[in-house]
Amino acid sequence: MTDMAKPVAFEAVDVERPPLRIFRHAAAKIATTPMMLTVIFVFIGGTIWTMVYSLTASRVLPARDPFGKDFVGLVQYVRLFQSERWLISVKNLGIFGPLTLLFMFVVGFLLAVFMDQKIRFENTFRTIFLYPFALSFVITGLVWQWMLNPAFGLQKSVRDVGWTSFSFDWIANRQLVVYTLVIAAVWQGTGLVMALMLAGLRGIDDEIWRASRVDGIPRWKTYLYIVIPMLRPVVVTALVIVAAGIVRTYDLVVAMTGGGPGLSSQFPTLYVYEFMFVSNLSQGLAASTVMLITVAIIVVPWAFFEFGRRRTR
Amino acid sequence: MSAVALNPAEAVEPSGPKPRRRFAPATIMVYGVLIVAAVYYLIPLYVMVMTSLKGLEEVRLGNIFAPPLEVTLQPWVKAWTSACTGLYCEGLQVGFWKSVRITVPSVIVSIAVGSVNGYALANWRFKGSEFFFTILLVGSFIPYQVLLFPLVLMTSAIGIYSTIWAVIVVHTIFGMPVLTLLFRNYFASLPIELFKAARVDGAGFWGIFFRIMLPMSLPIFTVAIILQVTGIWNDYLFGLVFAGQPNYPMTVQLNNIVNSIQGVREYNVNMAATLLTGLVPLTIYFVSGRLFVRGIAAGAVKG
């Protein structure tokens, strides 16, 4: 993914006559068969299958004749974007995704910087910040469901203490429930970002710090203008890991809000599941294809940039 | 960053480490922020532990932040042996053993495949290998939902749908991108001279893998195991879709127990059940703590 990860291809060893091209590294080709099968049949084949059948009228089972009489064109997509539920789902992901990324990275980076100040009890703090990452989204969702439950959690506790007008009922509020999901997701994932950033900070050469100190540059400026640009590879890796996770957000919502109240915290993943395994397969496939296209719009330019850049070097 | 004065080469330089005041405002702010953050992270765990040790009566009346007046392990026993998921009341132990039977083989198979992939891609590149690797990495961005139904069809076609085997296959497939990347970067970072020397001595693909690479890769295997055990144990979607009702893993069962709407909400039992489900990954995390951190660090900085 980064500059340092140049694969050590070793091909110059065959100084004498190289064997036939197809037999070169035959063992490697056999050993990577599972990978090739996965790539061809699952990642490529599966994606094409889903796209093709999203253009059909499949109900519970895939249509028999996807290119003939069961072909319905873009009907499923039209229906999708007329569905209130889908539009809510897209809007929720649109709020949840960027906000979660933003908070995770800002908080994660700040925590990493603070952890990097030669503090005491560093291990304790790190253990505390990272443990939610070891827990599943189901657990995260349930915990925060309880914490934020107005009749049981935070709100009730504060009121019991005497502040009776205190109100924190976002999870029961149709407009605000999506932000409670952000709270839970940030709780779960920031530790990972912090750990990755901290590792990146520790990888920075002491000479940089010495040089900036000699030049009298304030610490915060060194962080902002020298260290952050140097952390680009780490940031990219972390972004990739986290963003891929955010698009898949499913269990967190199922466990925490179940998509409610009403339809107010529906997510695209829930929509897909509901249709794919319950009533209308093609509709679920169309929805998942839209998810894929959205991801592609974000990932493809980045991938071209990353891989293209590496090849030219 | 580190102790400058320890380096003899620095001794001639006039600048030493700047002496720091113990209670400088900056120091106080650093600790203040860290402690506030730590409280935010710890509160949910604290609430769960406390509530799971209370009797139902106390839960209903009391404050979630208050420690139990009367400690009872009853909720834990109930969660493990007789909590209800809709129809059955056999407790979480069922899901626990299903999760064990899913996780162990999935971890072994996925890591075996991932490590061999990574090794082949790092040291034995062939025409097309980078293509497959690129698609694999790009494939890791494909939302699971896109591939879910094709995988249902594929696993049905080979007759393993609705069994534990289907879940294992699916975990192996979806673990492949990250594991391959992890191992590829690790193997690529090993000194190439080792590989060259082994080849000169006549070792082949598997010889080098088992005799040279594996003995040197204990750390990265530990990292991979930690990653996969926590990842697979915590999985919900694949267990739900591919395992079939009798094989539901612990996470699915937990959600069914807690979010099934029937009778009184036994928060103490629910929280005990939640803690039980989190116990395996948490134990791994606390035991392997430093390795866990060093692991993600190694993967990311080189990655």
Image (tube, coloured by chain):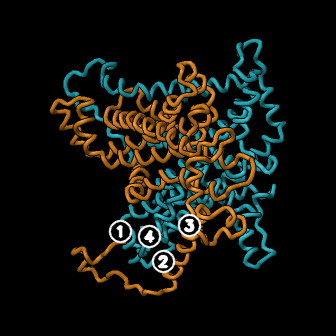
Q: Chain of mark 2?
A: A
Graded by Cα atoms within 10 Å as few (under 14), some (14 to 19) or many (20 or more), the crowding at tag 2 reads few
User: CA gap, disc 2 to disc 4?
Assistant: 16 Å
The answer to which of marks 1 and 2 sits earlier in the sequence is 1
Q: Label 1 lies in what chain?
A: A
The image shows residue A18, relative to residue B121, as above or below, that is above
At a point 70% along the width and 21% down the height, the residue shown is A61
Residue bearing mark 1: A206
Return the residue at label 2: A218
Residue A106 shows up from this direction: no
Q: Is residue A83 above or below residue A131?
A: above
- Numbered label attached to residue B22: none
Distance of mark 4 from mark 3, alpha carbons? 21 Å
Q: In the rendered view of the protein, which quadrant contains the C terminus of chain A?
A: top left
Near mark 3 (Cα within 10 A), the count class, few <14, some 14-19 or many ≥20, is some
Indicate the secondary structure of the residue bearing disc 1: helix
Whether tag 1 and tag 3 are in contact, CB under 8 A, the answer is no
Q: Are marks 1 and 2 on the same chain?
A: yes
Residue B42: which numbered mark, if any? Answer: 3
> x and y percent of residue B241 in the render?
61, 33
Residue occupying image coordinates x 42% and y 67%: A123
Mark in the foreground, 2 or 4: 4
Q: Which chain did the image draw in orange?
A: B
User: Which residue sits furthest left?
Assistant: B201
Q: Which residue was labeled with disc 4?
A: A116
- What chain letter is assigned to the residue under label 3? B
Residue B70 placed where, x, y %? Answer: 59, 69
Q: Secondary structure at mark 3?
A: helix
Chain A on-screen colour: cyan
